[in-house]
Image (tube, rainbow, N blue to C red):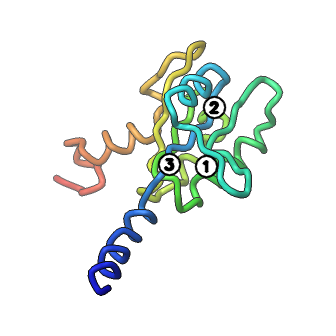
Amino acid sequence: MAAATASSTISQPAARTSSLIALIADEDTVTGFLLAGVGNVDLRRKTNYLLVDSKTPVKAIEDAFKEFTTRDDVAVLLISQYIANMVRFLIDSYKKPVPAILEIPSKDHPYDPAHDSILSRVKHMFSSDPSGPIGRG
């Protein structure tokens, strides 16, 4: 009986750490990720993705970003870069390590490293510039 209790106790934390990839992107990107098995609908009928088109209001994108970055079951948020540009102020102010935010290209909008705030933060952290965060000099 004690062995059964120990094994069930060990398996419970693993169930809590199962994490999802959330997605905010255009129809083609969302469809591709759903076909790859990324999609999820929970018991409250909440999905882990937002399909953005020309009629999607910026407020809906902002709300989805806030929801996905506060959910306990989301480990990574993938967002198309052109959509990320619409809510850049939210992405730039987001400082938590989890969920990680990754900007991805879409079919109609190629990736531009100059607009990726996460990449620029990493470059700034590892730059040898004396005015960098460490203040070498």
Q: Secondary structure at mark 3?
A: strand
Amino acid type, mark 3: Leu
The disc label shown at residue 123, or none: none
Residue at 43% x, 63% y is 15
Q: Which residue is mark 3?
A: 20
Q: Position of residue 67 (x, y in %)?
A: 66, 55
Whether residue 69 is situated above or below residue 53 in the rendered picture: below
Of circles 3 and 2, the one toward us is 3
Q: Which residue is mark 1?
A: 90
> First in sequence: mark 1 or mark 3?
3
- Alpha carbon distance from label 3 to label 2: 20 Å
Q: Position of residue 75 (x, y in %)?
A: 46, 52
Give the foreground label among 1 and 3: 3
Q: Which residue shows up at 46% across the image and 53% down it?
A: 19
Q: CA distance from mark 1 to mark 3?
A: 21 Å
- Number of callouts: 3
Residue 38, position in %: x, y? 52, 37
Which residue is situated farthest in the left direction here? 137
Foreground pick, 25 / 116: 25
- At a point 48% along the width and 21% down the height, the residue shown is 111
Instruction: Give the quarter of the figure containing the N terminus.
Output: bottom left
Spot occupied by residue 103 in the image (x, y as percentages of width and height): 49, 34
